[in-house]
Image (cartoon, rainbow, N blue to C red):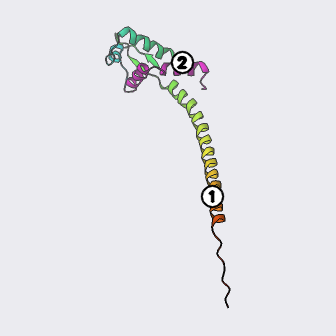
């Protein structure tokens, strides 16, 4: 499935915040409740809940239900789509860098040849002695 611009926009917007990235990193180790997710942060539970809503709207996490618990779980699909999108551009950038490297090598080689030619032109020519 090809990601839409809105899907990628929501994913990247959600990933733009360091708190949300930290929450995703925590959820990568397993599901957790809001209280468990809020514990390492110096912010209120409602503030964490707002971050969780952004992550849920982006499809990066889902909310489960186990009796009274409402654990959140990481959803890898949007991250995989963002990774695929980035990878396409990485390949383009890498090809551009390879072309640039080839151009620089060509320029260096041309410069070396020009310098060598100048050096050789400046050397005194040895005269051959005639034998008698």
The disc at residue 10 is: 2
Q: Quadrant of the N terminus?
A: top right
- Image quarter of residue 29: top left
| Residue corresponding to mark 1 | 115
96 displayed left or right of 32:
right
Give the total number of marks visible in the rendering: 2
**Residue 18 is one of the magenta-drawn residues:** yes
Q: Residues within 10 Å of mark 2 (few under 14, many from 20)?
A: some
Left or right side of 80 for 36: left
111 or 38: which is nearer to us?
Answer: 111
Give the residue at the far bottom of this rendering.
132
- The answer to which quarter of the image holds residue 31 is top left
For the magenta stretch, what is the residue range?
1-29
Residue beneath the point at 52% across and 24% down: 78
Point out the image quarter for the C terminus: bottom right
For the residues marked 1 and 2, what is the alpha-carbon distance in whole angstroms?
A: 55 Å
In what element is the residue under mark 1? Answer: helix
Q: Position of residue 21 (x, y in %)?
A: 43, 23
Q: Nearer the viewer, mark 1 or mark 2?
A: 1
**Residue at 52%, 22% in the rendered image:** 12
Relative placement, left or right, of 82 versus 25 is right
**Residue 95 colored in magenta in the image:** no
Residue 124 position within the rendered picture, expressed as x and y whole percent measured from the top left: 64, 70
């Amino acid at each position: 499935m090809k990601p839409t611009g809105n899907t990628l926009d929501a994913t990247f917007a959600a990933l733009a915040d360091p708190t949300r990235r930290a929450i995703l990193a925590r959820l990568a180790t397993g599901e957790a409740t809001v209280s468990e997710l809020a514990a390492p942060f110096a912010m209120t539970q409602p503030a964490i809940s707002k971050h969780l809503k952004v992550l849920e709207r982006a499809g990066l996490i889902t909310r489960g239900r186990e009796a009274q618990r409402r654990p959140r779980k990481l959803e890898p699909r949007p991250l995989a789509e963002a990774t695929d999108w980035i990878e396409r551009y990485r390949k383009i950038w890498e090809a551009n860098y390879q072309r640039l490297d080839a151009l620089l090598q060509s320029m260096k080689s041309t410069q070396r040849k020009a310098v060598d030619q100048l050096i050789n032109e400046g050397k005194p020519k040895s005269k051959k002695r005639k034998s008698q």
